[in-house]
Image (cartoon, rainbow, N blue to C red):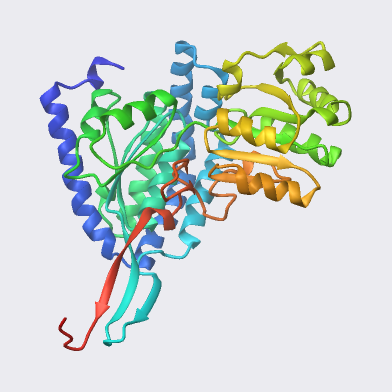
């Protein structure tokens, strides 16, 4: 953080409140904006992102140099890094959001009472959404696009490590808003890396309706402790893959390597591998060979160490850890029930998978594992709103109250009841 980026406390409060007032006014406009106008803004934003690719890459290079100087981990750097392919994916994601049905005004259900009252439950925007996130500059476009399509204004606060990348992406989104005649404050960006801005945002309940924190455990804990605003929590992804004795070995080898190694820094990356002890020789040994060949460090329990001398001893903490790196904890279990119990004790209710050809065992796992996403014979890296056909996501909500799982446009709306009568009075 530079001195120029810090502001006197009073000035920062005033600046944040001005953002809040502008966002509240923009939300009133967006709530009534027709679908065509919102889609036009998204299409123009996607075009602006593609056109601005050189500027975005230059800004990202500046962030990466700073990250290197700070000694950021490889996983954090991977989350931060942009290239032409990733920028194109960001623009394509915005276009996918434009293609989605507009949830605003959709009728969930309707019925007529015996007294003739016609009642409908209709989707409405949430209002102003504050989104706090770390490292990943693509969240700027994902969150902005989803909020816009769902009729919500948003106030974005990206991490200090992605400050310049985030500003460059945000500029393209604002260009899209202007081209469609929508207020620039519909997608606002906190213009400072000053950490005090987060505390101010968490107290702005008169302007902000929902807070979405998307980051590490310390950020989530701070928001849970300090926020006066309801929260949609994106908690850590301590994701598990359980290989049952009835798993197809070829499928299991491919899925486990993908779940761990496709991108180690995403929240859907597998962090713990559970394997039936009865299948250790037939299933676990070749999977260990594959993971090690792919550059993954294995931290295993005693039976797994005995199976392969390259396995390092796992600690109790390892089974609680979201590594976000090329490291995986491995444990052998007796059966599906022990696997379920382990996930219940150590998991984060994010995403967990079972690999088996036994349908009854799969159904037992899917019914009893209390996670936002459970998969059968598929990689945990499918834990993504885009892969679910949502275009993009703000995050994976791991709480039990809705929304749960990938938070897309439909999940960013609430509802109200619309009642039509013909002069009825209540007796």
Classify residue 5 as left or right of residue 405: left
**Place of residue 230 in the rendered image (x, y in percent of width and height, measured from the top left):** 29, 42
Residue under the point 28% across and 16% down: 2
* Res 172 → quadrant: top left
Residue 146 or residue 341, whichever sits in front: 341
Residue 359 or residue 312, whichever sits in front: 359
* Res 158 → quadrant: top left
Residue 13, placed above or below residue 152? above
Residue 160 or residue 357, whichever sits in front: 357
Classify residue 133 as left or right of residue 86: left
**Place of residue 92 in the rendered image (x, y in percent of width and height, measured from the top left):** 53, 50
Residue under the point 53% across and 17% down: 73
Q: Quadrant of the C terminus?
A: bottom left
* Res 271 → quadrant: top right
Residue under the point 68% across and 33% down: 339
Q: Residue furthest right?
A: 282
Classify residue 123 as left or right of residue 350: left
**Place of residue 175 in the rendered image (x, y in percent of width and height, measured from the top left):** 34, 49
Q: How many marks?
A: 0
Residue 62, placed above or below residue 263? above
**Place of residue 20 in the rendered image (x, y in percent of width and height, measured from the top left):** 19, 42
Classify residue 14 as left or right of residue 338: left
Q: Quadrant of the N terminus?
A: top left
């Amino acid at each position: 953080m530079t001195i120029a980026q810090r502001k006197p406390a009073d000035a920062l409060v005033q600046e944040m409140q001005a953002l809040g007032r502008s966002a509240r006014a923009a939300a009133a406009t967006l709530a009534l904006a027709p679908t065509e106008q919102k889609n036009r803004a998204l299409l123009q934003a996607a075009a602006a992102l593609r056109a601005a690719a050189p500027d975005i890459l230059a800004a990202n290079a500046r962030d990466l140099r700073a990250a290197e100087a700070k000694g950021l981990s490889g996983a954090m750097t991977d989350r931060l890094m942009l290239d032409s392919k990733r920028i194109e994916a960001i623009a394509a994601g915005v276009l996918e959001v434009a293609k989605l049905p507009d949830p605003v005004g959709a009728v969930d259900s309707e019925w007529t009472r015996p007294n003739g009252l016609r009642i409908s439950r209709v989707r409405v925007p949430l209002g102003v959404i504050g989104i706090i996130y770390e490292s990943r500059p693509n969240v700027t476009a994902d969150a902005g696009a989803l909020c816009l399509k769902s009729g919500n204004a948003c106030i974005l606060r990206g991490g200090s490590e992605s400050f310049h990348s985030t500003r460059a992406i945000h500029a393209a989104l604002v260009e899209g808003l202007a081209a469609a005649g929508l207020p620039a404050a519909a997608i606002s960006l906190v213009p400072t890396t000053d950490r005090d801005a987060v505390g101010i945002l968490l107290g702005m309940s008169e302007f902000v309706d929902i807070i979405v924190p998307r980051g590490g455990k310390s950020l989530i804990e701070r928001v849970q402790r300090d926020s006066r605003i309801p929260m949609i929590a994106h908690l850590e992804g301590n994701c598990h893959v359980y290989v049952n004795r009835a798993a197809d070995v070829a499928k299991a080898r491919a899925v486990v390597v993908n779940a761990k190694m496709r991108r180690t820094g995403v929240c859907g990356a597998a962090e713990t591998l559970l394997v039936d002890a009865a299948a250790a020789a037939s299933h676990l040994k070749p999977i260990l060979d594959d993971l090690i060949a792919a550059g993954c460090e294995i931290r295993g329990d005693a039976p797994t160490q005995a199976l392969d001398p390259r396995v390092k001893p796992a600690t109790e903490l390892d089974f609680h850890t979201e590594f976000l790196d090329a490291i995986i904890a491995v444990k052998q279990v007796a059966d599906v029930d022990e696997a379920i119990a382990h996930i219940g004790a150590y998991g984060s209710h994010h995403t967990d998978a079972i690999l088996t050809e036994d349908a009854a065992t799969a159904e037992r796992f899917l019914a009893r594992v209390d996670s936002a996403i459970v998969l059968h014979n598929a990689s945990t890296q499918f834990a993504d709103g885009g892969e679910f056909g949502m275009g993009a996501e703000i995050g994976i909500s791991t709480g039990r109250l809705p929304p749960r799982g990938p938070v897309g446009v439909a999940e960013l709306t609430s509802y109200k009841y619309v009642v039509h009568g013909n002069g009825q009075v209540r007796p």
